[in-house]
Image (tube, rainbow, N blue to C red):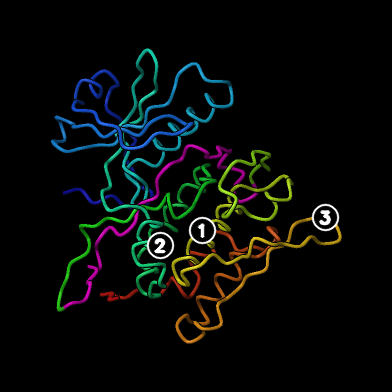
């Protein structure tokens, strides 16, 4: 078995015609304005895969997003924590992107099944430590995700085992995978961490940084830090960090204030709260970087076994 590590990814993709010929037994999983998500059987891998079908002949902006997603997934191929990408092909009507089928479900469903009860810190660290490393790798290679949210982090069921009525998570298990680079931003990696500002305000509002909500040009990698902070907060507290109401400063910029639930004071450490406060800093200039998140004391300490 080959164990891929950060910085040693493989970008080799299956030739389009060969990839298309391997697939059969298609069935629809979900559909939306972006296209369709299909499940298909891959005869070469002898397992099911996900096929993301996107309409051809779309407008210029949509075509650019398809091109960006293919480039991002190619750069992220083989990187732990990024959805494994097998390649893409075209039909007369669609671009078809082929990925591993991560069957564990997304983090929103995971929390919903728990009735949004908070997840323990050790479990959250295990879930997101690899995601942070993956995002930092992508940032250093000129890719910002721009749509980090609970629904785009998938949990892998097979890593969970029931032992003595507790859930044991193995130290080496692949815990969580980041999916959907459909809104990603591509920039010159030589410019990182001072990449060009973006005016593409797409994304999920609940996870958007205040500079995006204010309609100001923003740095995509710093927006990723904010969205990841919202996602981690939701896991630790079972709620989102902000109310739907917000205020504006003297310059008319939207300001969002963190609401730490008072009842959970003893359940979430000061180190975790410190990291979240830095990730959810309203000022993108002073907001912690993804490198800072990776090296923060809360994430640095590893636990060999995790229970919840």
Q: Name the spot of residue 191 as percent of width and height, x first.
A: 62, 44
Instruction: Using the image, tell me which numbered label, if any, was put on residue 128.
Output: 2
Q: Nearer the viewer, residue 297 or 84?
A: 84
- Identify the mark nearer the N-term, 2 or 1: 2
Which of labels 1 and 3 is toward the front?
A: 3
Task: Say which residue label 1 marks.
Answer: 228
Q: CA distance from mark 1 to mark 3?
A: 25 Å
Q: Is residue 36 above or below residue 267?
A: above
Tell me what residue is drawn at x 48 percent, y 53 percent. 149
Residue, far top? 92
Q: Main secondary structure of the magenta part?
A: loop
- Asked if the residue under mark 1 is in contact with the one under mark 2, i.e. CB atoms within 8 Å, the reply is yes
Q: Is residue 90 above or below residue 278?
A: above
Which of labels 3 and 2 is toward the front?
A: 3
Crowding around mark 2 (Cα neighbors within 10 Å: few <14, some 14 to 19, many 20+) is many
| SS assignment at label 1 | helix
Crowding around mark 3 (Cα neighbors within 10 Å: few <14, some 14 to 19, many 20+) is few
Task: Say which residue label 3 marks.
Answer: 252
Q: Name the spot of residue 256 as percent of width and height, x first.
A: 68, 63
Q: Is residue 161 magenta?
A: no
| SS assignment at label 3 | loop
* Magenta region: 165-194
Tell me what residue is drawn at x 20 percent, y 48 percent. 2
Q: Is residue 12 left or right of residue 285?
A: left
Q: Is residue 3 left or right of residue 195?
A: left
Instruction: Using the image, tell me which numbered label, if any, was put on residue 62.
Output: none
């Amino acid at each position: 078995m080959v164990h891929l590590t950060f910085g040693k990814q493989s970008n080799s993709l299956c030739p389009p015609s060969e990839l298309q010929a391997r697939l059969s037994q298609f069935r629809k999983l979900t559909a939306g304005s972006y296209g369709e998500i299909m499940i298909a059987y891959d005869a070469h891998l002898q397992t099911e895969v996900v096929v993301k079908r996107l309409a051809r002949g779309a407008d210029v902006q949509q075509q650019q997003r398809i091109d960006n997603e293919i480039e991002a997934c190619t750069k992220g191929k083989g990187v732990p924590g990024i959805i494994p990408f097998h390649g893409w092909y075209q039909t007369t009507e669609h671009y078809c992107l082929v990925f591993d089928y991560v069957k564990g479900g997304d983090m929103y469903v995971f929390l919903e099944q728990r009735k949004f009860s908070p997840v323990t810190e050790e479990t959250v660290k295990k879930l997101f430590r690899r995601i942070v490393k993956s995002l930092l790798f992508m940032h250093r290679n000129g890719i910002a995700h721009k749509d980090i949210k609970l629904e785009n982090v998938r949990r892998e069921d097979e890593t969970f085992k029931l032992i003595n009525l507790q859930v044991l998570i193995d130290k080496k298990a692949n815990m969580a995978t980041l999916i959907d680079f459909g809104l990603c931003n591509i920039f010159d990696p030589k410019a990182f961490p001072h990449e060009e500002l973006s005016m593409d305000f797409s994304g999920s509002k609940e996870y958007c940084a205040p500079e995006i909500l204010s309609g100001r040009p923003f740095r995509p990698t710093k927006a990723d830090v904010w969205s990841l902070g919202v996602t981690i907060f939701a896991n630790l507290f079972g709620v989102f960090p902000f109310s739907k109401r917000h205020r504006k400063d003297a310059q008319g910029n939207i300001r969002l204030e963190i609401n730490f639930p008072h009842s959970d004071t003893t359940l979430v450490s000061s180190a975790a709260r410190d990291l979240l406060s830095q990730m959810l800093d309203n000022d993108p200039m002073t907001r912690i970087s993804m490198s800072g998140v990776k090296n923060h004391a809360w994430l640095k300490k590893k636990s060999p076994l995790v229970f919840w």
